[in-house]
Amino acid sequence: MATEKAIEHYTYNDYCLWEGKWELIEGMPMAMTPSPIIKHQALATKVSYELVKSIGNCEQCLVLSEEDWKISNDTVVKPDVVLICDEPNDKYITKAPEIAVEIISPSTAKRDEVFKFELYEKEKVLYYIIIYPDDLKAKLYHLIEGKYVKQGDFSKETYDFEDTSCKAEINFDNVFKQFRMRQ
């Protein structure tokens, strides 16, 4: 006789009670520990700065770091950096960001490259950027006709996001320059 394993299915209400940093993907809790390394945080800050600088005084968009995006009652993620526009809620993100950035770490690589890639594509995030700190490069994807199309690998180039609500750009040379000098 086969024994069935009971797998707990968690919801947003459960998530709100947890201590520490977590994500919830289709009811499965995923710890965000240990804390990101300094290089990870510095790259997130540099990407945020590039986006904030480029959108200027645009009043409809915000650049945020590690903010809850509640996709459904059993899926809550914390992208490293997002550009959100016309968000009606001030408690957590409810609409798909126009740009989502994830910075790869050994403990999150599969989550970022597979699960979040598919999730962000399904949720219609216009641009998805995966940053590889060890390689000092970013893979940039643009949602075209419901599917991500790779725009390229970036390390010294500038990318202009043509169809975001506020004109945005990232100069990847500025993002990686400090770390390139240390190699």
Image (cartoon, rainbow, N blue to C red):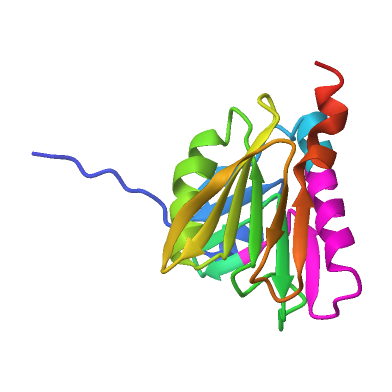
Residue at 46%, 54% in the rendered image: 149
Residue at 68%, 24% in the rendered image: 134
The C terminus lies in quadrant: top right
Question: Along the horizontal axis of the image, is 138 left or right of 10?
Answer: right
Question: Along the horizontal axis of the image, is 171 left or right of 16?
Answer: right
x, y percent for residue 110: 48, 36
Total marks shown come to 0
The N terminus lies in quadrant: top left
The stretch drawn in magenta includes residue 62: yes
x, y percent for residue 129: 62, 49
The stretch drawn in magenta includes residue 55: yes
Q: What stretch is highlighted in magenta?
A: 44-69
Q: Is residue 143 above or below residue 47?
A: below
Dividing the picture into quarters, in which one does residue 142 lie? bottom right
x, y percent for residue 40: 76, 35
x, y percent for residue 90: 77, 77
Residue 27 seen? no
Question: Along the horizontal axis of the image, is 99 left or right of 182?
Answer: left
Q: Nearer the viewer, residue 13 or 102?
A: 102
